[in-house]
Amino acid sequence: MLSLQHLSKYYQSGGNKTFVLNDVSLDVDEGEFVSIMGPSGSGKSTLLNIIGMLDEPSEGYQYFAGEAVHLLKDKQRSALSRTYMGYVFQAYHLIDELTVYENIETPLIYQNIKGSERKALVADILDRFNIVGKKDLFPSQLSGGQQQLVGIARALIAKPKLLLADEPTGNLNSKQGDEIMELFLKLNKEDGVTIIQVTHSEKNAEYGSRIINLLDGKIESSRVLNHQ
Amino acid sequence: MLNNYLKIAWRNLYKNKVFSLIHILGLTIGITVCMMIFLFIMNEFSMDRFHQKGKNIYRVMRSAEAFKIKVPYLSGPYAPALLNDFPTEIKKAVRVMTSQKLISFGNHAFNEKKVYVVDSDFFSLFTFPLIKGDAHTALKDPGNVVLTESTAKKYFGDEDPMGKVIEMDKHQPLKVTGVAKDVPSNSHLNFDLVIPISNYFKENWFNEWINNNGFTYVLLDEHVNPADLEKRFPAFMEKYMGKDMARIQAHFDLSLTPLNAIYFEDSSSFDDVKHGDKSVVYIFLSIAVLILVIACINFMNLSTVRAVERSKEVGLRKVLGALRNHLMWQFIGESVLLTVISCGFSMLLLMLLMPWYNNLLGYSLSVSWTAWPIYLFLIGVIVAVGFLAGSYPAFILSGFSPIQALKGKFKLGKGGAMFRQGLVVLQFSISVFLIVGTLIINNQMSYVKNKDLGYDKEQSVVVPVSSDDLYRNLNLFKTELKSNSNVASVSLMSGEPGGFYDIHSFEVEGQQDVFKPNTEFADFDFVKTLGLKVIAGRDFSAQYPTDSTNAILINRTAATKLGFTPEQAIGKWVKNNMRDESRRRIVGVIEDYNFLSLKENINALFISPVEDWRVVVIKLKPGRIQNGLGVIKDAYRKAAPVYPFEYSFLNQKFDTVYKEDLRQQTILSIFSGLAIFIACLGLFGLSLFTAAKRTKEIGVRKVLGSSVHNIMLLLSKDMLKPVLIATFIAMPIGYYCMDKWLQNFVYRTPLHWWIFMLAAMITFGIAILTVSFQSIKAARANPVKSLRSE
């Protein structure tokens, strides 16, 4: 599904290059559930952002769904990410001024989907996530776990092929975290959504089918897990 | 999508109440002021444009070398002669004389000041629609009268006024044959009653060529070029006025002023129709633009700095698939929404303020909510403010990189900060400029008001000779008053100081050319009553029985212009070419006094003891004003029964002469005050933001031992820097512009340095007050709180 080859990201400070990612190559197939781990500052989030096309690499080649991303223009890249990807953040990042319903609806608006269709899609996902009763509340009225649930619902509303999650359970207690992870697993298994998550937690990483360890901007190890 | 934008715009407004209030308050005030000025300007430029034949109507103006200006007064015979000599060019000629009449009927009597005496074509030439009666026949007979709607209502209430008979000056019955709609405020002609000029056809004075007493309007044929017609006027004048002109040694010429241009001609005591001043229109227009600029800058600055708070939303929307133009439109939409809300408030505010504004202007403007111009204006404002001011923050906001925005690491660029500081500088430059302007205008007006005018204006009552009855009994009136113990002296004269002074031509001993001074015709008590000073020779005196036919007084300027010292002038002879049969000797020279308004220089003045009495000036003894007024009223009753007693005080003459200037001064002060208020609102918003942004820095500094005082200084310094720069920019511009403005006045106050100091201090004071409010709050906050929130 995606392939990164000899990818680097660095910042020029004075005469020195400070590398955040250094010559990283990585392939992810459709249907995989990849966990990226590593200590703080190892480049996990940057890698995820580059995969999600929110950030650009300084060097290297990037392919996604058969397209050479490094050759695309901003608008095309944006169109690509819009149709294929959903994002989940550690801090949920819901729009405070919008209700649950409106937050989930927003990505559809930018894809020019008609009002009636949007209504049906949002109603469907609210039902699926069991948050119909919360649809008119504002984010500040929800618990952290509920907010993240809305965040995931929003990420999934446009039926992405790839779900990118940056420490999705980082702000949650362990019970809430487990629920989110179970949900990810289910999405991966039943709906075939490819998932790439960044996490600190060994336990959460174990939910994935592959764990990649980053250290100082390089892939230190890659380990495939065999779940029964 | 629109729905979504509107929702978020509305919720944002609601959430940030202080910022929304600053935005909306600033814009509402700005737009309201602009609408007021817009109405004013619309009215000024719509002057006399409602006449259907207006394009071809001209007023005939007379010019002579003696007057620097053109004079609209012509005598009765001009109109028929013009029609006779230019039958194809001039279709119609209508004479309009302004007059005052006593109108009485039953037990009622009114002294009507706006009576027009006109040719019967008046209502068919001008578009003053008649509600009742026929425009072509209403003024056919001498005994007809047309009333305006309000006059009819005043006289007869709800009764039908048609056919009612009223009496003019107690001897001539007039039958109401028409009711005209009230004259709109955008007309230079302004009347309450209209009577036919045919009443005077048989009077001698009316048929004399040199007896100029009214306006003449002509309707030209569509194909006639007025310039061509004007070329034929010298021959016309020679034909009819040749002899007269030779006799009085003056040369007159005629010209045509288009109806639309009359209003913006210079006003003078020689043309007492309503006049406007284009420079005032431009001043107001500039203020409107400046205020709108200030309001827009507020908008841009506040929206941009607030963008930082919204960077998360922007970043998110980008992640969720928003393209840059989606976001641009969202933010422009928000500013348009704010503008629309402000426009709504402005309309409400305007409706509330209209009575007060009309009072301020001194005439009534009406807002035509059903006509397009006001809406076109509002749409213009929405486009200008909403789109232009909204697009800068929209551009900045939509340019955020999503990752940075989400991390909250976003910083507004250095270049952008410079730009915004530049905007604040511009804002305050405008404010300082307006303060300087307002101060100088106020200073000038109070200078003019308090200037020693050279005559004694206290305790003096001016009674206009407004009726034939009073004129006939003037001597009785005067004798009765003089004998009263409350009265110091009484003088009959043609013009009180600040009043009307004709210009006549004189032959003067030893002079080649005729001399053309202003003239005063007064009795022997003139000098005493006005408290003038005789600097050479003597005053008129009853001890010299020949004074009334042989003597004349002149002022110092006249002596100087004639090349005499005051002493040399005594005994020289002069002859009034228009009035006198024989020569008069100069018996005295008086010190100059400001008999014209202070806008004009003191001119030469000849005071002759000739009967041409239009006002009575009564000087009362100190402390006797109340009793004195009672005495004057009684005497007036005897001299002119029925007529309502009217008077004014000589020291109030200033207020009437400078009424327009005083009004404009008030309006200008208010508007510039508002401009400063809006600018400070913006500064307040910025300081609010800065203090909030620097909470952490302040916390750290406090932990490290900085005092409240130091932190206040730190915060205020940055905010006040643009104000300081603005002050330095605005001062020279203010100096230049106000120096230009003062050139309009003959007597002007110097541009004191302290005015500029004061302006700078006012601006700084207000700015410091605004900024320190926030700074103190931030500086005194507990650092633990601000640091914990990180």
Image (tube, coloured by chain):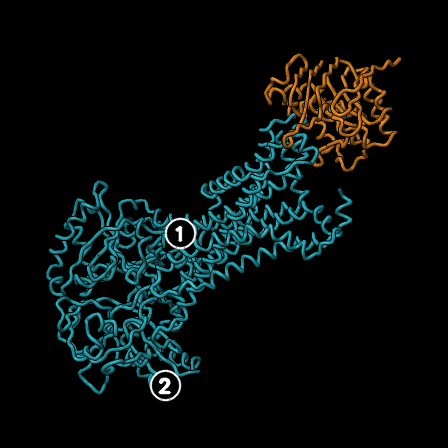
Task: Looking at the picture, tell me which residue is in the foreground, B107 or B95.
Answer: B95
B371 shown above or below B548:
above
What chain is tagged by disc 2?
Answer: B
Chain B drawing hue: cyan
Mark 2 = which residue? Answer: B484
Does the image show residue B127?
A: yes
**Image coordinates for residue B613, horizontal then vertical, percent:** 27, 73
- Give the secondary structure at mark 1: helix
Task: Looking at the picture, tell me which residue is in the foreground, B47 or A111.
Answer: A111
**Which three-letter amino acid code belongs to the residue tagged 2?**
Asn
B519 shown above or below B405:
below
What chain is tagged by disc 1?
Answer: B
Q: Name the quadrant containing residue B458.
A: bottom left
Task: Looking at the picture, tell me which residue is in the foreground, A152 or B165.
Answer: A152
Q: Which mark is residue B318?
A: none
Chain A drawing hue: orange
> How many other residues sit within 10 Å of disc 2, few (<14), some (14-19) or many (≥20)?
some
Mark 1 = which residue? Answer: B281
Left or right of B478: which side holds B512?
left
